[in-house]
Image (tube, helix red, strand yellow):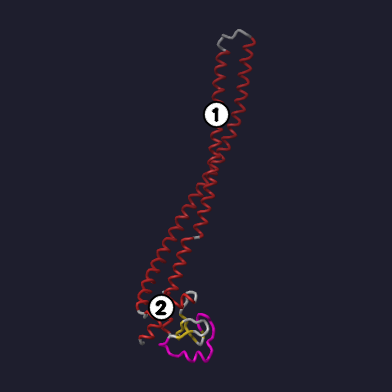
Amino acid sequence: MDEASYEITSLVELQLLESAILRKLNEINVLKKNEKLQKLQKELSEINEKLELSDKELVGLEHERKKLEDMIALQNEKIKKNEEKLFSGTITSAKELLNYQEEIKFLKQNNDNVESKAIELMISIDEWKPKIKEIEKSIARINSEIEMVKKEAGEKTKVMSDAVKRLREKRATVISKIPKDALAKYEETKTKKGGIAVAVLKDRFCDICNMEIPTGEAEKIKDLSKLYKCPLCGRMLIMYRDEIDEIKAGIEN
């Protein structure tokens, strides 16, 4: 193979390498966005909010229960003092005696009501606690999944980044083999043609615009060592050869 032919296949190889690098970079961006991770993080945020509300509810119930218990304790203390006074033998008035008896009766009835409310609160508290534990289990599960997804994404990103590094090194090697004028033409065409500079003619079809080259034009494109221009899409055009498939396979593998 002469130098000119090698130069032409190098242009194809350069384009294939750049396309492969772009694909890998896009895959890395997808991994960074990671829709599964975003979904899990959203789910975690929602369930953390649910836990926070549940904790507040439980704290509120506990606070109310404590207030009722303190009230019961205060009223029991007052009942005790009234009973001590009642049986102290110091009360001489029937009216005073009746007042103490009525107050003790009222305090005990009130305590019964307060104790009933306290029991209801304790039942509510006992019902909330397992719910909160289930929420905490869900949070632990989601956190575990997030760590797994992050680890998997990190490993894949590392593989992709290493692949990009190898492809860029290979690209630099290929560029060093291409004459400056041909490289400049390649870059100019790439800019004008949406990032694709080189097309391959096979069976009279341009593999980029997928159009059949007119017979008259196709008959002029016969020299493997020459670089042509596609009369339809205007890209740099070379004739197909088996080496192109070998280059492509080497990059993909």
Q: Quadrant of residue 112?
A: top right
> In percent of the image, x 47 and y 89: which residue is there?
221
Along the line of sight, the residue nearer the viewer: 245 or 180: 180
Residue to which mark 1 is pinned = 69
Q: Does the stretch in magenta take in 103?
A: no
Q: Are marks 2 and 1 in contact (CB under 8 Å)?
A: no
**Is residue 157 found left or right of 73 in the rendered image?**
left
Q: Does the stretch in magenta take in 217?
A: yes
In x, y percent, where is residue 207? Answer: 50, 81
In x, y percent, where is residue 37? Answer: 49, 57
> In percent of the image, x 57 and y 12: which residue is there?
87
What span is colored magenta in the figure? 206-226
Q: Is residue 234 above or below residue 22?
A: below
Numbered circle sitting on residue 192: none
Q: Quadrant of the N terminus?
A: bottom left
C-alpha separation, residue under disc 2 versus residue under disc 1: 87 Å
Along the line of sight, the residue nearer the viewer: 192 or 109: 192
Numbered circle sitting on residue 184: 2
Q: Is residue 87 above or below residue 145?
A: above
Give the crowd class for mark 2: few <14, some 14-19, many >=20 residues within 10 Å.
Answer: few
> In percent of the image, x 52 and y 56: which residue is there?
39
Point out the tag, 2 or 1, that comes first from the N-terminus: 1
Amino acid type, label 1? Glu
Q: Quadrant of the C terminus?
A: bottom left
Main SS class of the magenta portion in the image: loop
Label 1 residue SS: helix
Outermost residue toward the top in this view? 92
Front: mark 2 or 1: 2
Label 2 residue SS: helix
Amino acid type, label 2? Ala
